[in-house]
Image (spheres, grey):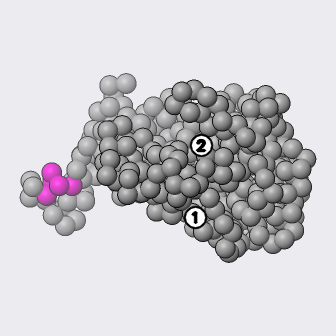
Amino acid sequence: MVVGATPEALRRRGFRPVGRDFPVFLHPETHEEYALARTERKAGHGYTGFVVHASPEVTLEEDLARRDLTINAMAETPQGELVDPYGGLADLEARVLRHVSPAFVEDPLRVLRTARFLARYAGLGFTIAEATRALMRELVENGELAHLVAERVWVETEKALAEPWPEVYFQALDDCGALAVLMPALAADREALDEALGRLHRLPEEGRARPWPAGAGRGWWSTWTRRRGANWAERLRQPKAYVELARQVAQTRALVAQARHTPPDGARLLAWLDAVDAWRRSERVVPLISLVSLEAPALAEELAVAWRLAAQVLPKTLVEEGFKGRELGVELARRRREVIDAALRRE
């Protein structure tokens, strides 16, 4: 946090601007983020309806006042002095999630962030202050929550599913009435909600670590919604990316189920990589393998090896050898299968 400076002053010192909506810069050598002190003014609905003001006159205390929770509204000077104008340290020691100011109600996303923080720290004894819960309910009642787009809601939900106690996230949203606005189908179906919360709560008893591996929580949720029925994901207002993920997870679960009866071979592993579109969407592979590791660690290791080796067989190499058209696709699959089979035999 930089106080008393301008964007021009930082640029002159070699800092590179990267902030789109507010002034954030990267240090020319360490590449650490440096943000100018700023304030916000509500100018519209939703979490984007703010006008940001950054100037040398904005104080550190004013900048901290715009934070959502007191435990996030503390700073430390280069000399090690704690700046804590809103009692964040006391709340940290008391394990309380408390809003900084009544301006909490200006940003509906704070309802989800508070619930997500609780999902991270509930096991350590943290609770939400009753006054903060009241403001969360106020955001529901005044209609601000309805202005959140589905994609932004699911960004927070995905993060919450990776926290140590993800069921607490949904419980906190339900307690303040937010779940009925954001996921009305789930809030209305108490049997489905209880089933989801119960399954999430019992995961540690099934030997699964918390926090989950990256992407595993999202994968579990996609599996659960798919099992609830063909249109359940749409009823929960999930973005299309989550509906597609549910399809990928179903294919992955089928692979795990098959591996319980017969050891996987190169053809089956290659078919799975093709089915999840690994060659064009490589970012999907590691989270799905993380999901497999929760139930079948040995299979996850085989998938990781298969993916690493098969990804090294590039179409460009075959084109240079003279392959083209249908022959190119056939040879590409053959060579990828070959390296996977060889790796499985070595094991």
For residue 216, the mark is: 2
Magenta extent: 315-319
Residue 7 left/right relative to 224: left
At x 85% / y 50%, what residue is drawn?
132
- What amino acid is labelled 1 in the image? Val
Q: Position of residue 291 (x, y in %)?
A: 57, 41
Residue 168 in the magenta stretch? The answer is no
Decide whether the magenta segment is chiefly helix, strand or loop: helix
Q: Nearer the viewer, residue 30 or 237?
A: 30
Residue 165 left/right relative to 177: left
The answer to whether mark 1 and mark 2 are in CB contact below 8 A is no
Residue 316 in the magenta stretch? The answer is yes
- What amino acid is labelled 2 in the image? Ala
Q: Position of residue 54 (x, y in %)?
A: 54, 59
* Quarter of image, res 230: bottom right
Q: Nearer the viewer, residue 186 or 156?
A: 156
For label 1, the residue is: 52
